[in-house]
Structures are given as C-alpha cells and as structure tokens.
C-alpha cells in the first residue's frame, strides 16, 4: 500500500479526484487519513500495474 498527500488539497479535492477516477474507470483510489492528515491511498492488487500506470494516476492530481 502507498499513501501520499497533495499539498494544498482539502478532503473535498480528494473526494472529487477519487470519484472522477472511478467514474472514468481509470482506477479505484480512495482518500484515507494518516496521522490525522487526509491523503490518497493506493492498494495495488493487479500484478500487471506498472510504475508508468502509477505515474499517470499521480499526474492526474495536477
């Protein structure tokens, strides 16, 4: 599992981003909390997921 935060994002931003990824069928990424801070959580279950795939998801946070 991998967690990370986008500086300046509020919980609503993570919710919007997560919903967009799910509705576009790109990924299932859920917001979570780590040490009280909202962040994104990737739980990678597909062994074919590549670093490039993860990079695309991270880039979609821009």
Image (tube, rainbow, N blue to C red):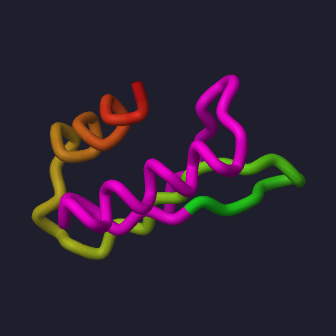
Give the residue displayed 51% in from the left and 65% down from the top: 30
Instruction: Tell me: residue 55, above or below residue 23.
Output: above
Furthest residue in direction left, as rendered: 48
Residue 55, picture quadrant: top left
Give the residue displayed 31% in from the left and 66% down from the top: 22
User: Front-most of 52 and 31?
Assistant: 31
Furthest residue in direction right, as rendered: 36
Is residue 25 found inside the magenta-colored segment of the image?
yes
- Left or right of 15: which side holds 59? left
User: Front-most of 15 and 29?
Assistant: 15
Question: Residue 13 appears at what percent x and percent y?
Answer: 58, 43
Give the residue displayed 23% in from the left and 37% down from the top: 56
Q: Quadrant of the C terminus?
A: top left
Is residue 28 found inside the magenta-colored segment of the image?
yes
Instruction: Tell me: residue 59, above or below residue 34.
Output: above
- Left or right of 46: which side holds 10? right
Question: Residue 48 appears at what percent x and percent y?
Answer: 11, 64
Total residue callouts: 0
Give the residue displayed 34% in from the left and 55% down from the top: 20
Please provide the residue range marked out in magenta.
1-30
């Amino acid at each position: 599992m991998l967690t990370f935060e986008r500086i300046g994002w509020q919980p609503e931003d993570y919710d919007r981003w997560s919903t967009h990824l799910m509705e576009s069928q790109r990924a299932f990424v859920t917001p979570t909390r780590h040490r009280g801070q909202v962040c994104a959580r990737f739980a990678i279950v597909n062994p074919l997921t590549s670093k490039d795939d993860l990079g695309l998801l991270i880039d979609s946070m821009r």
